[in-house]
């Protein structure tokens, strides 16, 4: 979720910096109108994984129409809608990946080396754990509190990382006695929490960010178009 939100924030800021306000709003509105059609095409070619994406895309279109009717289409509102519609496909790819075999999205991801048949599930898990340590772990351990002081947070999180690493290493080397093949328990224990984390917790988390932490989806100060920024710089000089 944090990675998708960062990608959306950077994308919306860059696009806003390239376009004037009117063109930017028009582009966002047209993109929102096209998104349900894209979701329908993906449902036809990639099964039912994109149904939620289609329903949420329709909801965003209705919200956009509501803002237009209420004459409240600001740059920040347009950026927020664009950021949400950019996050949704990432969530769909994430929560559906553990259940996939060979289909359109898996073939596309295989080109980047991310599909489960290209990279082992444990390797993907280790990569995500490293990303988590560099982000969530630092934010969690760098806060002091009455119940959990800063020193205790750092030691506790370091212990959790050691336990997860030992758990992963154990199942990576475990083999079924009868077949000699790797134990599939690790894949199940990785896939199920991954699915639950993205699908069950990810969507409410996205709604919470859109409601209370919009700076995580869009920049605090929406970027101005380059032409306007240059004119302002000339006036100041």
Image (tube, rainbow, N blue to C red):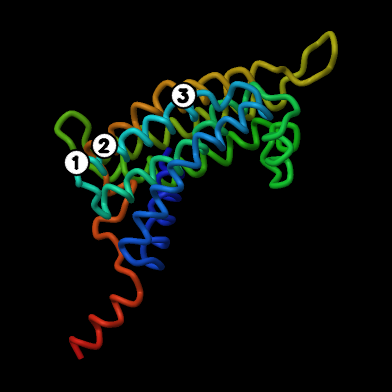
- Find residue 190 and report its horizontal and vertical position in percent: 57, 24
Q: Which residue is mark 3?
A: 199
Q: Nearer the viewer, residue 89 or 19?
A: 19
> SS of the residue at dot 2?
helix
What residue is at 31 percent from the left and 49 percent from the top?
Answer: 78
Q: Are marks 1 and 2 in contact (CB under 8 Å)?
A: yes
Judged left or right of residue 22, residue 123 is right
Label 1 close to label 3 by CB (< 8 Å): no
Q: Residue furthest right?
A: 179
Classify mark 1: helix, strand or loop: loop
Instruction: Report x, y in % for residue 212.
Output: 22, 38
* Residue where numbered disc 2 is placed: 66
| Cα separation between marks 1 and 2 | 6 Å
Which residue is rendered at x = 26% and y = 52% of the image? 76
Among the two numbered marks 1 and 3 on one chain, the one whose residue lies closer to the N terminus: 1
Foreground disc of the pair 2, 3: 2
* Residue shown at the point (46%, 24%) measured from the top left: 199
Seen in the picture, residue 22 relative to 41 is either above or below; the reply is: below
Where is residue 165, by image quadrant? Answer: top right
**Residue 21: where, in percent of width, then height?**
30, 62
| Quadrant of residue 114 within the rendered picture | top right
Q: Which mark is residue 210?
A: none
Q: Is there any visible trace of residue 169 in the rendered image?
A: yes
Return the x and y of residue 25 as percentages of the image width and height.
34, 54
Residue 133 visible in the displayed image: no
20 versus 89 height, above or below: below
Is residue 211 toward the left or the right of residue 112 in the image?
A: left
Q: Which disc, if any, is residue 70?
A: 1
Q: What residue is at 69 percent from the left and 47 percent from the top?
A: 112
Of the 4 image quadrants, the one containing the C terminus is bottom left
């Amino acid at each position: 979720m944090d990675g998708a939100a960062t990608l959306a924030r950077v994308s919306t800021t860059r696009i806003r910096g390239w376009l004037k306000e009117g063109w930017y709003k028009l582009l966002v509105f047209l993109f929102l109108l096209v998104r349900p059609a894209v979701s329908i095409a993906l449902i036809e070619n990639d099964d039912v994984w994109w149904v939620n994406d289609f329903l949420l895309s329709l909801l965003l279109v209705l919200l956009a129409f509501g803002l237009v009717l209420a004459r409240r289409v600001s740059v920040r509102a347009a950026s927020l809608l664009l950021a949400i519609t950019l996050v949704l496909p990432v969530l769909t790819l994430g929560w559906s990946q553990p259940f996939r075999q060979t289909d359109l999205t898996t073939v596309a991801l295989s080109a980047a080396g991310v599909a489960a048949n290209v990279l082992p599930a444990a390797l993907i898990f280790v990569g995500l754990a490293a990303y988590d340590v560099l982000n969530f772990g630092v934010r969690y351990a760098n806060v002091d509190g009455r119940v959990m002081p800063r020193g205790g947070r750092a030691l506790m999180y370091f212990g959790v990382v050691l336990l997860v690493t030992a758990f992963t290493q154990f199942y990576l080397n475990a083999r079924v006695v009868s077949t000699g093949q790797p134990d599939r328990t690790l894949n199940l224990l990785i896939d199920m929490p991954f699915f639950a984390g993205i699908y069950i917790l990810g969507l409410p988390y996205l709604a919470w960010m859109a409601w209370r932490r919009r700076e995580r989806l869009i920049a605090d100060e929406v970027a101005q178009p380059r032409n306007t920024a240059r004119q302002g710089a000339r006036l100041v000089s």
